[in-house]
Amino acid sequence: MDLEELRAFLDVAETGSFLAAADSLGVSRTTLRRRVEALEARAGVPLFKSTRSGVILTEAGEVLAQRGRIMMQETSALLASIREVGQAPAGVLRVVLPVGLPPHLLTPLFGVLRTTYPQLRVHASFSDDPLTEALEDVDMAVHFGEALPRGPWLSHEVLRVHEGLIASTEYLERRGVPRSLEDLRHHELLSWEAPGEDARLWPSLRGPRFRVEPALIATDIHFVRTCCIAGQGIGLVPSVDLPDPGVGDVLVPVLPDIVGRERPLRISVPEALSEIPKIKLVLSHIQGVLEPL
């Protein structure tokens, strides 16, 4: 497939106008139309249909646009990365992380990377769902998930964390310690919401999920954890056994023999970047650091 034709098609799809797309790409409208028509000829079906306000995608065009965007992202990511082939890890490593990972977990990992690869700079961004970010902006995506991600990703499980209930000792002294699932109905419940999951369905160790009505649902893990430290309720979060520096042993597990599960932590890499030496070396180093955990 001709990349110039595909780029022209995608720009028209985004703007809904041949004129606006031509201006965006810096080419004439005639040139742009010729490229789109050539792509339609290759496809053998119309990709656009005209409306009073511009053009919209046909059903076939929708399919091509969805896959075509991924192809362009993969191409951009690959071209940006091959400049570093044969070199020690250097430049910018673009990492997308789940919103709300505790800072005291990330800080030492960043320090290890900087010590090992001093020429490497890290651009860390946070997302409710790291795998939905544009591929041209991602070298590595850190996310939770049992299933392998769909799409152009190669995924590596680097850690299994225990997800369960926590609360502060002050809260439990004030409100009482629940002894059963039924007791949870009388408490303030706080829940982390994982991408694509219902935060009102909590996991049990030996049975089906059970439904609760949390007072707080948040995609930010650290926010839920901080609310628990402040004595505002019982929270469901991953990494329940993670210590909280500076606050002592404030948090304790709740119903650890009844509620919880193991949840894998994964690092996924765009398939187009999987053989780039920088990515392979950094991924291997991160796995080595996390393995003892």
Image (cartoon, rainbow, N blue to C red):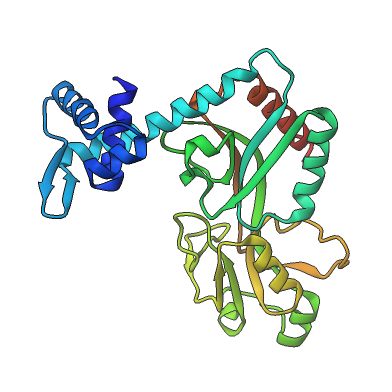
Q: Is residue 99 left or right of residue 114?
A: left
Where 172 falls versus 24 (above or below)?
below
Residue 269 vertical position relative to residue 16 in the rendered view, above or below: above
**Left or right of residue 49: residue 237:** right
Quarter of the image with the N terminus in it:
top left
| 92 vs 232, nearest the viewer | 92
Q: Position of residue 217 (x, y in %)?
A: 54, 70
Residue shown at the point (16%, 41%) measured from the top left: 59
The relative height of residue 165 versus residue 205 in the rendered view (above or below) is below
- Residue 33 appears in view: yes
Residue depicted at x 79% and y 53% = 104
The residue lying toward the viewer, choosing from 188 and 279, is 279
Q: How many marks?
A: 0
**Horizontal and vertical percent position of residue 223:** 66, 67
Residue 105 % position (x, y) = 76, 50
Residue 257 can be seen in this image:
no
Q: Nearer the viewer, residue 220 or 73?
A: 73
Quarter of the C terminus within the rendering: top right
Q: Farthest bottom residue?
A: 174
Q: Residue at x 54, y 39 (%)?
A: 137
Quarter residue 282 falls in = top right
Q: Nearer the viewer, residue 163 or 288?
A: 288
Residue 267, percent from left and from top: 60, 37
Q: Which residue is drawn at the image coordinates 86% and 68% (left, top)?
A: 247
Left of 215 or right of it: where is 162? right
